[in-house]
Image (cartoon, helix red, strand yellow):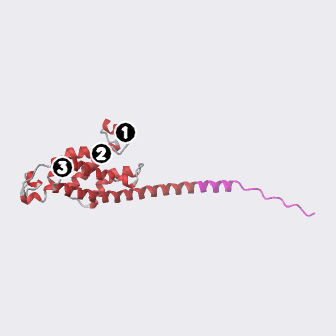
Amino acid sequence: MEPENLQDGESWGGRWGLSSERTKDAVKDLPIQNREAILKRWVELTLATYPEEAVRAFAKTRDPFANPLGAAVRNGTQALFDLLVADADDLKLQAAADGIVRLRAVQNFSASEAVSFVFLLKTALRELMPAGCPELETMTARVDRLSLAAFNRYMQCREQVWKIHATELRKRTEHAMRRMNVAVEEYVPEPEEKPSRD
């Protein structure tokens, strides 16, 4: 989308009907104007990182039980977008990213692929917000913050996965060792008779 010509000293906040006092907070208003379109595009781009059959399943149903991937992407992107507009802190961003990141942490994604959905928001923003407007720059900077928060959450999820694997391996090993000990205890060879010296 090409930007319209601005008059000297005019900001995009002013173009969108914001007073000069509110221009500094324009990012809270401008993305909301395109919220649904941005979210739709972000979801499309995120789903494109999955195999085609997953995308088809997402399109078929909105039932979160039948389609947990679709529900996580839809709900997660909405929450994250609203938090970015509100300039929420990193802990809130991490918590909101948890649903998507947790799913991607247990799928066949590398660390960079798992959090790549965050950067796809930049693509959606650049496609649907006027190029060069300060609000776009502010939002893309916040997306960078979100990427760090998502990566932190990804590492926490991977650590949990490895702990689960380690616990399961330990339980299996202990179970196998117990079975071996029982087998050894059950098999007690009879003592050999020593030949008499008579």
- Residue picked out by circle 3: 129
Q: Quadrant of residue 51?
A: top left
Q: Is 131 situated left or right of 19 in this image?
A: right
Identify the residue at image location x=31%, y=37%: 59
- Find the magenta span and give its range: 176-198
Residue 142 picture location, percent across and down: 24, 58
Q: Residue at x 20, y 57 (%)?
A: 137
Residue 74 appears in the rendering: no
Q: Amino acid at mark 1?
A: Glu
Q: Secondary structure at mark 1?
A: helix
| Label 3 vs 2, first from the N-terminus | 2
The residue at the point 34 percent across, 58 percent down is 151
- Residue that carries the numbered disc 2 in the rendered image: 45
Mark 3, Cα crowd under 10 Å, few <14 / some 14-19 / many 20+, is some
Task: Compute the Cα span from label 2 to label 1.
Answer: 12 Å
Q: Residue at x 39, y 52 (%)?
A: 105
* Number of other residues with Cα within 10 Å of mark 1, as a class: few under 14, some 14 to 19, many 20 or more: few
Residue 178 falls inside the magenta stretch: yes
Task: Say how many tags the image has.
Answer: 3
Question: Which residue occupies the extreme bottom position in the image?
Answer: 197
